[in-house]
Image: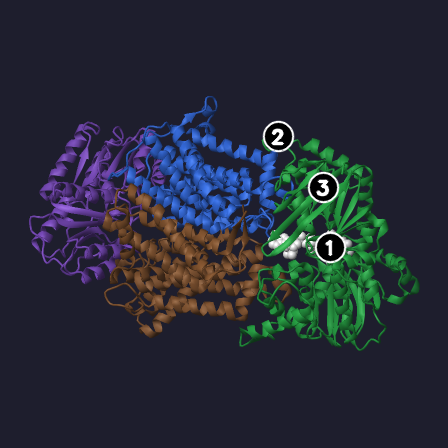
Amino acid sequence: MSEIFDILASAGLWAAVLRIATPLILGTLGALLCERAGVLNLGIEGIMTFGAMIGWLSVYNGADLWTGFLIAALSGAVFGLLHSVLTVTLGLSQHVSGLGVTLFASSFAYFVFRILVPVAGTPPTIEPFQPIAIPGLSDLPFVGPALFVQTPPTYLAILLALGLAYVIFRTPLGLAIRMTGENPHAAEAQGINPMVVRYGAVIAGSALMGMAGAFLTLSAFNSFFPTMVQGRGWICIALVVFATWRPGRALMGALLFAFFDAFQLRLQTVLGGAVPYQLFLMIPYVLSIAALALMARRARVPQALMQPYRRGER
Amino acid sequence: MRFERREHRSVLLVVATPLIAIAAALAIAGILIAIAGAPVLEAYWRILTGAFGSRLSATETLTRATPLILTGLAAAVAFRARLWNIGAEGQFYLGAIMVAAVSSQLVGNWPAVVQIPVLLAVGAMAGMVLLLIPLWLRLRFAVDEVVTTLLLNFVAVLFVSMLIDTVLKDPMAFGWPQSQPVSDDGMLPKLLERSRLHLGLAIAIALALVLHFVQSRTVFGMQSRAAGLNAQAAIFAGVPLGRTLVFVACLSGGLAGLAGSIEVMGVQGYVTTDLSPGYGYSGIVVAMLANLNPIGVVLAGLFTATMFVGADGMSRSMGIPSYIADVFVALSLLTMLVAVFFTQYRIRR
Amino acid sequence: FIPSVRASAPIKVAGIHGSPVENAWNSVLHKALQEAAAEGAIEYVFSEGVSGTDYPRAMREYAEQGARLIIGETFPVERQAREVAADYPETAFVMGSSGTEAGDNFGVFGTWNFDGAYLAGMLAGKMTKTNVVGSVGAMPIPEVNMLINAFAAGVKAVNPDAKHLVTFIGTFFDPPKAREAGLAQIDAGADILFGERIGTADAAKERGIKSVGSLIDYTPRYPDTVFANALWNFRPILNAAIADAVAGKPTGRDYTAYGLMKEGGSDIVFVKGVAPADAEAAMEAKRAEIKAGTFEVPRIMEEPT
Amino acid sequence: MSGQVLEIVGVSKRFGQNLANDDISLSLAKGEIVALLGENGAGKTTLMNILFGHYVPDKGKVLIEGSELPPGKPRAAIRAGIGMVHQHFSLAPNLTVLDNVMTGTESLWSLRSRRSQARSRLMAIAERFGLKVDPDARLGDLSVGEQQRVEILKALYNDARILVLDEPTAVLTQIEAERLFGTLKDMAAQGLSLIFISHKLDEVMATADRIVVLRGGRKVAERKARETSKAELAELMVGRAVQRPVRQASKPGDLVLEAAGLTVREAGVNKLNAVDFRLRGGEVLGIIGVAGNGQTSLARVLSGTLAPSSGNLMLYGKRMEQMTVGDAVLAGIGRIPEDRNKEGVIGEMAIWENAILERLSEFSRHGLVDKGAGIALSRRIIDQFDVRGGTPASRISLLSGGNMQKLILGRNLINRPRILLAAQPTRGLDEGAVAAVHERILEARRGGTAVLLISEDLDEVMALADRIQAIVGGRLSPSIDADEASSRKLGLMMAGEWESEVIHAV
Ligand SMILES: Nc1ncnc2c1ncn2[C@@H]1O[C@H](COP(=O)(O)OP(=O)(O)OP(=O)(O)O)[C@@H](O)[C@H]1O
Ligand SMILES: Nc1ncnc2c1ncn2[C@@H]1O[C@H](COP(=O)(O)OP(=O)(O)OP(=O)(O)O)[C@@H](O)[C@H]1O
Ligand SMILES: [Mg+2]
Ligand SMILES: [Mg+2]
């Protein structure tokens, strides 16, 4: 018991929570933005994979880290464009298009990687983002090393979460996005083109997903491995619902999820293999389902989610 | 520019559009093949021979199509009733592991004629149970099943991983996490010697025919479609909504569970966590390509398997990174989706 | 059908990798095969990232394309792999496997680089200041267990009081997660990490402690961090297999032993002067004993705790 | 043509084979109220959607104060001062009233939404036009009438000078409708120009300055309201003289349905409160009342989709414990739901499937659907009930509202039911269709069917019903004979005035 307390009281745990949460925060925000405009984007897993690959590849070829990050975001935007054409313009089923994008983006990422980096052995490395201690704050006892010694993308992710919350709830653009997700016909009747809004949201959301992937290769690690995204994208899809489509809660949800992962890794060092590790890994999923059951009736799902909007169809 | 629904489809259109789609996928893939430094036309030829050029490739294509048809049917049946079952992957694994468990622990020495049906039933039931949970959550708490079924996939795979690491671990596998095997009498008979082609293909096609019949001709088929299209009107017309959905879930989960069971009993013989290269997810795409029509699912499953096996074989014979196979499948799926769309809509100014 | 190949022509060897060749284990095979091809001994073709479902097909395809020797790994498809081998008696299969050899043409090998791990443990045991060392592994499978157990045994051999932490990340392919596992162990007091998985050393590097690598030489990648590696060399196994295949001898045997240290198949490489001199000396003595066959590192396949 | 704020010139629009608008021209002066009339499917909504930029016309143009409006751009239309209240509300139930109104009114790139300013502006407009709403209420929590007000406020908030209302009263009660038209007239007096669409000739005659009639996509007539009559308008719309049928006296038959103390409690509220009524074969019992007083619950109980919490339902003298839809259908109860799109039909299914869905037990053997019989039946319905616009195999959503309603009527009446439950049977239908539906209902009555008619349309109830009861707050008034009914008396009943009399009587 005291060991568990020690774990909880260690700044390292909480620093790890933020680190592990960062790609989840970025990905969840991206998925959330798409869904707020009424488009489910199951392309996330593939977009993250491609972002991880292209971000790393750019830096490996001499771009600086932020440029790599930006290129990953751009690549995400391109896949977002593809998803938009399929789901917004053509109005195809959003699940299927998303799964198609995931399959395409990830296999294409591996293909490009293999063509351009045909090495054996562990792939080459880049110099990743280094943690930056925020002057003043990082000197605080416990909280300092726990929260204020992170790499820049982590700070960026948190700012983005707050920023997205502001945009969605406090700006005319956010209202337009929400209206498009609730009732695109109503948006159109107010002079907003729901197609444009959906395109914009999906493209921007996918760019965030690309950044989420890039975090894995530019900050969490320093090289790209095929399959390294490991289902993190799917977790983001779940987190959006867990967060009831609110960026602030998405941030909390990602942190909670990351907490279980970080805690689980530390608990193993104490308990060894006494409990199958799979049980720990299941916790976040089971917990998400339980949370959904508890709050689903209160959650306000965007009413037009997954419904194609075709002008003038009856 | 806008799209207008076609009320009638000409035969020419229905035949031509998929061909155009495949041509488009081939063209894009051709660019990648050229970039990889291989002769494009030869590569196309190799895709064809890779899928059907020999007894081996043809049987392999059919073997790979089998689970895709079953998971495709699982998705088609559910989606038709607007039950968004994204959990076929988990149901697949649960079906597979239950078959391995029951065969290795309980009924392994039963004769094949008894054991095989029992195992198939067990696997189907496992899949059902896993889908009934999210359905219950939806009916009871109004929880959206897209997310619950998606999440349960991970729970199911971790559960399988745990079982094959602990109680079901095969002691003969030197500690590798794999389940104890299905007994020899529990394995599905081969359709052809010196190949992996097994009875599962026949089962899958038979089930597709049955399902087609059920959906197009039976009261249940009509009611489940009504429930999916407009639940409120269905209730008004006396469709027992809850019961219909439960039945749909049993069919869908059952088919996905069956897909896993058949894969274990027909091909692998035991369960590992890489039994499925995403069959559950591909099934959704297969179902959509088929426009949720069970007979179409057979064709779409064959199509998808052909593209993959052909391109995979091509990559090996031409020395192109083998990831090209997945790229090619993804491209064909995307272009095919667009093609299916244009058989249903026309462009208007 | 061409009945036989001229002996002087390089034979066609196919590699079927269940993982991408970035995976350290596969990279060892891949590199050895590439070297052999570069030397003109073989003609090498390969597929990577082949899933369990596709694996038997890849085996059959290569066999039908005339590969004389097929190298790979059949852990998830043992039963089917033996069926394939039985269907293609002309082709030699030598596979990383947890099973036993079968027939005339299905040979197996294990990954026994635990000798090096034991020796690295001897260095680590003397170097730790906190008296806590840690190991990060993928999953508790025998080859990983053996390795981690050997490392722990090496530590205990020189420092019986040392505490050994173990974390499994549950997947073969998640370097960021391995890194997190390493950081967790450092937070729990470890000051030397044995990284069965890539990513572990990144944690060590970040916190400025030392780390041990496995299978390949990680020191160039982490110059100031990885001071020792439990190397595994696939060439001895490959050469034996090629020799058998060319000579037309049955390849249905267990090639594991060619990977042992005393056969030159594995070893430790370490950066001199990092560990205390007496520790290095003790380790070198043990190394000589192992090579001479007078000492055998315990082979413990149970899950380490 | 000077002084015209709006001119529509030669507009045509085709959907597939269907020419929805054919060379239509129309103009509107400042402060004028124009009513657009026409059968279901005549092309009224299409024309207004072109005006507002939802649709791009194939030919023709729209001029606002002389300058041409770019086609297909709702935003441009809004800027030009057009406000539109859609036939189907375009509101987001999950957002607040203020959100609904504000959407799209500020520059999308501005960094902050000026909510408090918007709130006071909205309040001011609401005040000025007498359209009170709570800006912070969630829209989905409002009544239909309040939602209608929000729709109008949205248009006014955008500074609309031309207001288009597509069937604004279809879902409003008479009182709400009267209040709305009062407001509209005020607006016109303040300089707004209005176009409204309606099927209710009374309100058209009472409100419009000018009336434009469409038929089959063409403009067939234009009249000053002062110079025309209801009869003429009806004839112009339909192309022939229309007359609503009249009920002939008849003798009611046996008691078929009796409710005693029927109560429905939902979430702690009595939606139906100890309701009593009796229904005999061959008579029409009209239930009148303002929407939201328990009509829905009553209809649901009798259709078998809702179980009463307490009370007795006697069918042909037998007590029904729990009546399911199946029981109701088997017992010969024909059911016309109040919302045909939501409950009556499944748009994506074929006409024949919609015809037999609720009686699958009759149209199936051993669990197999008898498609042949289904098609035969739907063909009979199409012939006998004059359903136009589709074959048995076509999607039912292709039918116009009136034809859909005829099909629903047909599937219930073709095998003479013993009881017909008709909830708002003519809502949103044109004059010709209304006459046809009324004729069918009276025909069923003549044939001995007992009809329970739930309607908010007093004219309809007075024309069809033998006896009338009012529903107020979930309670049912005692019945009065239709011959004794006057508008005043019915108005009092709907206000709940009977209660005091009952108390006196006891
Ligand atoms: N988006 C569309 N696609 C295809 N056909 C359409 C579309 N919109 C309208 N139509 C057809 O055009 C014709 C005119 O329809 P419209 O909605 O304008 O009629 P309306 O006069 O408003 O009828 P109602 O009184 O029922 O509202 C109808 O036949 C209708 O079926
Ligand atoms: N929250 C409440 N508190 C008190 N009385 C209520 C409440 N909600 C509804 N009622 C009463 O219950 C009766 C029926 O309500 P409701 O509006 O649900 O009727 P309905 O059958 O749905 O009618 P319709 O759908 O035609 O509007 C009304 O008399 C109403 O005043
Ligand atoms: Mg209309
Ligand atoms: Mg109501």
Residue D38's disc is: 1
Q: Which residue is mark 2?
A: D112
Question: What crowding class fits label 2: few (fewer than 14 Cα within 10 Å), some (14-19), or many (20 or more)?
Answer: some
The quadrant the N terminus of chain A occupies is top left
Display colour for chain B: brown
Q: Are marks 1 and 3 on the same chain?
A: yes
The answer to which image quadrant residue A120 occupies is: top left
- Residue D268 in sight in this render: no
Amino acid under disc 1: Gly
Q: Is mark 1 within 8 Å of ligand 1?
A: yes
The answer to which image quadrant residue A154 occupies is: top left
Display colour for chain C: purple
Q: Position of residue B286 (x, y in %)?
A: 42, 57
Secondary structure of residue under mark 2: loop
Residue D7's disc is: 3
Marks 2 and 1 close (CB-CB < 8 Å) = no
Q: Nearer the viewer, residue B84 or D55?
A: D55
Q: Chain drawn blue, letter?
A: A
What chain does badge 2 belong to? Answer: D
Amino acid under disc 2: Arg
Question: What crowding class fits label 3: few (fewer than 14 Cα within 10 Å), some (14-19), or many (20 or more)?
Answer: many
Q: Nearer the viewer, residue D470 or B46?
A: B46
